[in-house]
Amino acid sequence: MSTAGSPPPPLTQGAGYGVIVGLGALFAIVVIGISNGLHRFGNIKRTSAEYAIASRSLGVGLTAAGAVSGWTWSVTLLSSCSTAYNYGVAGAMLYGASNMSQIALFSLMAVRFKQKVPQLHTHLELLRLRYGTLGHLTFLFFALATNILVCSSVLVGAAAAITSITGINTYAALILLPVAVAAYTLRAGLRGTILADYLHTVIIFIILFVFFIVVYGTGSEIGSAARMWELLTEASNKNPSENYNGSFLTMKSIGGIEFQWLSLLEYTGVVFNDASFHQKALAAGPDTVVPGYLLGSLSWFSIPWALATTAGLSALALETTSPAFPTYPRRMSESEVSAGLVLPYAANAVLGKGGSAGVLLLMFMSSTSAVSAQLIAVSSIIGYDIYKTYFNRKATPDQILRSQQYGVIGFTAFIAAFGCLLQGVGADLGLLYNITGVWSCAALPQLVFSFWQSRTPKWTAFPGIWIGFFAGLAVWLSLAKRLEGGVNVTTLAEMDPNIYAFATSIATGTLLCTIGSIFFPSDFRWESISVSSAHGGQGGETVDEKELKEIEEDARWSKENLHKWLIIALVSAFTIFVVMVLIWPLSLYRDYTFPLSFFGGWVWVSFAWSVIAFVIVGLYPLYEGLPILILISKGIYARLTGKPNPTTAGEDGAEKKSVQLTAGQGHDASGESEPTTPIDEDALNARKGSATGSDDSPAEEKPAAAAAPVSQKA
């Protein structure tokens, strides 16, 4: 109970430090142990490509789980509940719908990448080949800016929530969280990171189910959908919202719709510029990337929808009616809502200290999942796009791997320090959530045109991206002053200046790319990108003929198969966008307040959706991974009993092929399935006398390498 100021934390500081340090150490041990088991008994080699893109061997289940975990930030859990608190049932649904669409749309980019340049390690490598050094550095800047802002929002939101629950020092949380993640990311690479993300996602779903069942089934504070409906009706009468008729039980919410489009614009830019999504797409197989991302999109939607429908609405229902609510009898302040405290307060009211402990685990799981993905993404950029491209063009795979690991350490230190800086100047979750799009939207049009339009000229990247960025920046600052009365931390976080700024950046970039492609076209030829030019073509690594041969001989990489998946991705992503963003919310945008029967159905559909999602990303990866689990078990048994390792040698002592981590299968000419072997990216054949050239020139200005171009198969 609190009449003024912040309520006391329900848990001790020891609980906070215990979870961050103790659970962080436990996960590091478990993940590193699993990673070592895969390398020792699963014949998965430790290479820079394995570290960065998991040898392109992930199946559907882990690809979907990776997409879900990579998009389930602490920001997701906290801000979705805050949105439901502000806009009622509309906020929960609109938050999920606006942010699931980007994952579905990204499946198009993922399969397009595999069509055109399947051998690359980062998306920025392609942009260097298309636009030269200045264009590459521009995209590099905005990609890293996106990664930094994503990590900052994740850490600041999680630290604020953990501090409110346990009372630990916020700066300590900002430092310890990324350090705990780096402990296993440094050793395990992308595959280990995705396995950790999978474990985190399973735990998040379990806690979600507990919250939901207590709130709508067994709890004494609410206990049923009918009681929730009554309390929300009472809250609407006592503290009416800006929705239709002041109700929290309606989809007619102009504020909710505005928030939906802010999220859609901003986080489309985030997903497409965030290198972590590209890395996970590269890690998936050609037959698994599209279904993985589409299923991940549909599964992810259930988390903010069900959680916000539970915790966000519980806060509205209980804040002025239940002495168990931390702020009772007052309502939550705007600063508390903006800081993301709706979820921890609601959990404490409904489940007491157990609920607070559950939110503490949620914050740890979601923040570490997001940060680990960012660490791998940034380390891959440092290894391939900075170190190899600008400092050591003849870098060996071992040197690249070492630079990636140094990148993990360096970026961990940087984001910890930057998070402390933001905390010091008073930046909170609400501010960081709203302003990220100022940077992420600037390069979005050029990035899309790069994959889909061969006529786009170099100048659309540099200086085109900067023109769009400064146009959006000018609109952002001027509208903050004009509409909100000044330029400060508070006014810059307001919704209207940000929406117009995002739209301006995207519109400016789209206009420049369209004009350039029509009136000043380049003549970029995808077939000019050979494996050697993709890997530098600078006298360092040359064509990996073994890898190219494996891609050409694998039917899954055929032009026809990838085109099939492109059509599936196009139809599916368009359908998801139209249904979830347009038809569903707009069909209910009318003078209509949910009656009890409709609200009850709404609530239980959200729960059923989350159960199906758990089957997809929680249980299906286990089914897919049975072959490798059996393989590792046999290897461990052989090790303990002193018998020959069956995973590395057959009866004649010949080395066996490694089994794919998941159940993605290749097909021979007869159509029969056979296990596929992960491509060893860095087992490159060193050859002398490779061609050298300037890195400043785009690919179309270079002669094609002697090796067969990738476009013959892609």
Image (spheres, rainbow, N blue to C red):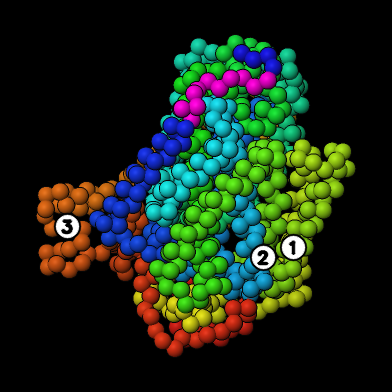
- Which residue is under mark 1? 466
User: Which element carries disc 2, helix, strand or loop?
Assistant: helix
Mark 1 or mark 3: whose residue is earlier in sequence: 1
- Which residue is under mark 2? 138
Q: CA distance from mark 3 to mark 2?
A: 50 Å
User: Which element carries disc 3, helix, strand or loop?
Assistant: loop
Q: Position of residue 331 (x, y in %)?
A: 69, 19
Left of 6 or right of it: where is 122? Answer: left
Left of 645 or right of it: where is 33? Answer: right
The residue drawn where x is 13% and y is 58% is 644
The reply to whether residue 656 is in sight is yes
Looking at the image, do the residues carrying marks 1 and 3 touch, with CB atoms under 8 Å apart?
no
Question: In the rendered structure, does residue 465 fall within the stretch colored magenta?
Answer: no
- What is the number of the mark on residue 53? none
Q: Amino acid at mark 3?
A: Asn
- What is the number of the mark on residue 645? 3
Looking at the image, do the residues carrying marks 2 and 1 touch, with CB atoms under 8 Å apart?
yes
The magenta span reads 5-16
The residue drawn where x is 82% and y is 48% is 477
Note whether 77 is above or below 688 in the view shown: above
Left of 234 or right of it: where is 352? Answer: left
Dominant secondary structure of the residues highlighted in magenta in the image:
loop
**Residue 255 quadrant:** top right
Comparing 520 with 630, the one in front is 630
Residue farthest to the bottom, as pictured:
689
**Residue 156 quadrant:** top right
Mark 2 or mark 1: whose residue is earlier in sequence: 2
